[in-house]
Structures are given as C-alpha cells and as structure tokens.
Image: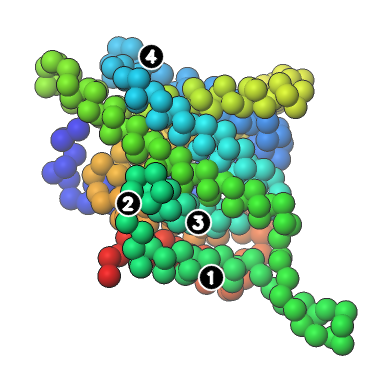
Amino acid sequence: MQNFTSIPFFGESLSIFVAVSWTISALFSEVATKRLGVHVVNVLRMVLSMLMISSLLYVVTGSCVPLHADVQTWWWLLMSGVVGYVFGDYCLFNAYAVIGSRFAQLFMTVAPATAAISGWILLGETLSLSAVLGMSVTTLGIALSILGRGRSEEAGKRRIHLNLPTSGVLYAIGAAVGQGLGLVLSAVGLKHYEASIRTLSLPSETLDGLLQTLPFASTMIRAVAGLAGFVFILLVSRKGGALLRGVVDRRGMTMLICAVFFGPFFGVSLSLMATQYTATGIAMTLMSLSPILILWPAHLFFGQRVTRKEVLGAVISVLGVSLFFIRF
C-alpha cells in the first residue's frame, strides 16, 4: 500500500477520478433504472459487482473471496452494506427514476453532513462549527436549485414551491443519509480489516498486495449484505418475473454493466482507496463534484434544461461540503 505515496497528489487525483466515475455511473444508472426497474437493477448490480471484484481478487490474491477478514471486519462492513446499499441505494435508484440523476446527485452533497453527525453520535467525533456551517451552506445550495416561485390563488401572491416531486426529494434525502452513515461504518470496518491483516506473519510483498486490495475486498463484503437485502425486497415485492425479463434485455443490461463498472466496482472501491492517500476532507470534497460534473452530460444526452440558478445551487452545495473539513 505504500507504493503510491511517492506519487504527488495521488489521493487527490484519485478523488477527482472517483467523482467522474460516479457521474458516469449515475447517467448509465438513470437509463438502466427507467428501463429495467429499481428492484431488478439493484439485484443485478450487486451480482455484477461481486463478479467483477471476485475476478480482480483472484488475479491479485489467488482467491475469489476476501481473505483474512475477522469477525469485527465482517460485522462492520455487512452493517455498512445494509445501510449504504440496501437502504441508501434503494432510495437512490428510486430517486433516479423519479427526479433523474442530475438532482439525485445534487442531494448526495448531504452525505458528508450525515457522515459528520454519524461520526459524532457513533464514534464520539467532534462536530465543529465549520461542519454546522457546511450543512447550512449545502442546504442553501440545494434549496436554490429545487425551489421556485409561483403565484398562489390568493390575491395573486407569489409563494415558494418545490419544483420536484416530493417523493423523489424524500428518496434522494434517504440516499444521502444511507451513503453518509454507510461511509462511517465502512471506514470502521476498513480499519479493523487492515489491523487484522497486519497481525499476520506474511512476506512484505504478499502483505502489500493484500493491503492494496482492501478497498475492493471491503466493497465485496458490503455487496454480500446488499445482495441479500435486495433479493429479499425482490421476493417480497414479487418482481421475480421482471428479473428474468431484465436479464435478456440487451440494452438495459449494457447500461447496467457500465453503471456497475463505474459505480460499485470502480467508483466505490477507489473512493475507499482515496481516503488512504489523502485527508478524508479533501477526498470527500473532490468526490462531491458530481453534481457539477453531471450538468453538461445531462443536458447533452437527456436534453434536460439547466438553469443558471441550478448551476449556482450545485456550486454552493459543493462549497458547503468543503466547509465540513475546515477547522476554525
């Protein structure tokens, strides 16, 4: 794991790449979700992500499954999978279907606030004045993007109204809460995993190889919980027939495979890696650029009208994220 520390701004570059990767994944996910349905997409993306990660682990470590993870590691990462994938991604993909990837990604700037509050409650971390200010600024940016003015029926007065469906907004908020809390839980699990591996008497070369795959192995453990949860939801909702139809939908599966590669496989794993090579605050800020990066592709590919107010709102939201990690 020490190999990359000598590369200037490696963690920062990785964080920007993660933001680009998540943007691409969001665009593909929106198309796949509207074509295949939320339940089908969530089950298949977990299966595809596990297949991709197990293939990588086999090439690097010779094993298709995560190695040397102790009970505490499994516990924290499975809990992270339930919160981040089952709850968070269920909400996120419903948000894609209702309000689209552009606004869903905007709401994901709330995730650092959730992470900060979760760290304060669960880990006893300090909730600084800058974090509170960051929450306020992020909320202001989102409000600027999604609120508008219209005339009420009473004497032609103008009133503030929500430009998006309420259900989509609630799904997007749930997605941000799931991702923020899931990130805190996965960070704890990752620390336990690294500590577990470092206690082993292994050659330095083997040890380095295992440490470099930790983010991917951790993501696979989280995906185990995600797959179990989504299969349960699929069975309860009686969508088994939709799953079979989705598998033979070539266009839908192509979109989904691309979404999985840039999201759960590449993006999520590299996001965990990025926090190992730069300060968490810097990584989170740079990874939160997706709401800005997605504006032009959403206009180009989906023909969505992007207003100056929405651009300003996205920029303010990302600036709010950066305030979380400034101490004053």
Amino acid found under the numbered disc labelled 1: Leu
> On residue 140, which mark appears?
1
Q: Mark 1 vs mark 2: give the one in front.
A: 2
Q: Residue at x 32, y 60 (%)?
A: 325
- The way the protein has been coloured in the rendering is rainbow
Q: Which of the 4 image quarters holds residue 53?
A: top left
> On residue 125, which mark appears?
2
Q: Mark 1 vs mark 4: give the one in front.
A: 1
**In the structure shown, which secondary structural element does the residue marked by tag 3 occupy?**
helix
Q: In the displayed structure, does residue 244 sit left or right of residue 208?
A: right
**In the structure shown, which secondary structural element does the residue marked by tag 4 occupy?**
loop
Q: Earlier in the sequence, mark 3 or mark 2?
A: 3
Residue assigned mark 4: 64
Furthest residue in direction bottom, as rendered: 155
Q: Residue at x 16, y 42 (%)?
A: 5
Residue 178, placed above or below residue 156: above
**In the structure shown, which secondary structural element does the residue marked by tag 2 occupy?**
loop
**Where is residue 15 drawn, in percent x and y?**
34, 49
Q: Could you tell me if the residues under marks 3 and 2 are in contact, i.e. CB atoms within 8 Å?
A: no
Q: Residue at x 18, y 50 (%)?
A: 8
Q: Mark 2 vs mark 4: give the one in front.
A: 2
Measured in 3D between alpha carbons, the distance from the residue under mark 2 to the one under mark 4, in whole angstroms, is 36 Å
Mark 1 neighbour class, 10 Å CA radius: few under 14, some 14 to 19, many 20 or more: some
